[in-house]
Amino acid sequence: MDERAKNDAAFIISVIKYALLFLLIVGFLYIGLEALVVLAPIFIALFLSQVSVTISQAIMTKFKIKDSHNPSIGERNKVRNRIAVLIYILLLLLVFALLGGIIYYLIAIIRHISLQLPNFVRESDIINQISSFFRNASGPFGLELNPAIVIQIEESIISLVTTVIDALPGILGNILSSLSKWFSGMPRAILVLIITVMAGYYFITQSSRLYRFLLRFIPNKDFVRKIFLTTSRLTGTLFRIIGGYIVLMFITFVEALVGFLIVGLPNAFIWAIVVALVDLLPILGITTTLIPISIYYFIQSSPLQGLGILLVMVVIIIARRFIEPIILGSAMRLHPVVTILSMIIGIMVYGIGGILLGPLAFVILREISITYEVEAKIRLFFAGVFNNKKDTGKTDII
């Protein structure tokens, strides 16, 4: 085989390696979601238990509380574990209280909208306002529209508005029906809660036994140590990610509050909080709150305020697109370009939810590669491939 053929073969092998790496990432994203659904209670328990242990250690350091340590009777970190278990229970109660409150208010809001919105739109006389707008369009815009075209446009828009108004109760009813089906799965939710509570308790109080249990099946102590090290690193990374999203939420809140105050929106502070919270949800986003507000102002013959709300929405969206990769990349210790790439791959695999899940999957892969030195092994592998190619080339010349 001549040198050119060997170079071509080496190039093809390199392309195949990168393609396999890409497929591995995509496969991890796809399979990871299925595994995440099944193992969600364990992951939640692991995260909250780590948070509880960290807080308990901080409390003991702050108040100079001494812990008991007597391995002969199985007493190790007894005080810390008791404090951590108490904090863990409080965190669980807080999380479920927040989720319950959010779901309750969402159902109440959707039910209120489904009952009031059709009547509100009809009472606002939106159809006549649209017709009046097209009839008077020649004045402000200097246009002379054909009356037949104006009538056709009016009929099309009136038909569209009527269809939307008639469909709203059904759409909102379907949403309420979906939520009702979700609540019908409460026995499963209770089982998940029990598993989460028990798993977190054992993670806090029986971590040493868990270590010995793994050693029974995996004799390699270094490998087991790396498992715990990876878990610890992922927990710390998750802390930073949550902090990054809190920063993003605060920035969105400030932008929305300033914009609402300029526009003159009543209860601007409350609406800014709602926008900041909804903006964290990848499926909803700020458009689900700001577009209805803008439409309301247009219906109420306040086009300047409606345009102002739309401008606020555009500013928030643009600012988030620039700031999010930087903040999350810093929290995840990923380059902004890698963060954007992970979002794109996540969207390809998961849809809109991939904006959050894609970077998270990349972080998990990164921590695993660091702990098990995968990157160094890949680098050595490619170095060996290229060195062999050079050596082969020298042999052919001789």
Image: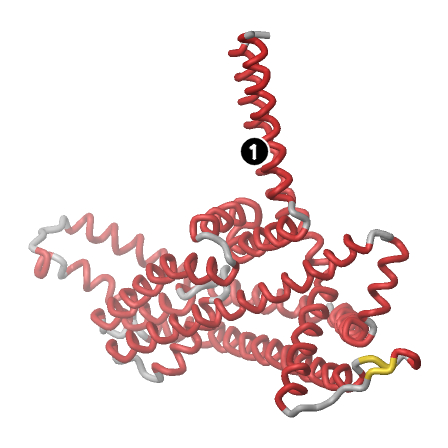
Q: Residue at x 28, y 74 (%)?
A: 259
Q: Is residue 52 above or below residue 368?
A: below
Location of residue 163 (image quadrant): bottom left
In this rendering, does residue 364 appear at all?
yes
**Residue 11 position in % (x across, y down):** 53, 22
Q: Between 223 and 56, which is closer to the camera in this rendering?
A: 223
* Residue 349, x across and y down, in percent: 57, 46
Residue 187 visible in the displayed image: no
- Residue positioned 49% across, 60% down in the render: 282
* Nearer-the-camera pick, 305 or 135: 305
Say which residue label 1 marks: 18
Q: Residue 260 versus residue 166: which sits nearer the camera?
A: 260
- Looking at this rendering, what residue extends furthest in the front direction? 398
- Helix, strand or loop under label 1: helix
Q: Residue at position x 53%, y 54% from top?
A: 359
Quick check: 298 left or right of 386? Answer: left
Within 10 Å of disc 1 (Cα), the crowding (few <14, some 14-19, many 20+) is few
Compared with 15, 159 (above or below) is below
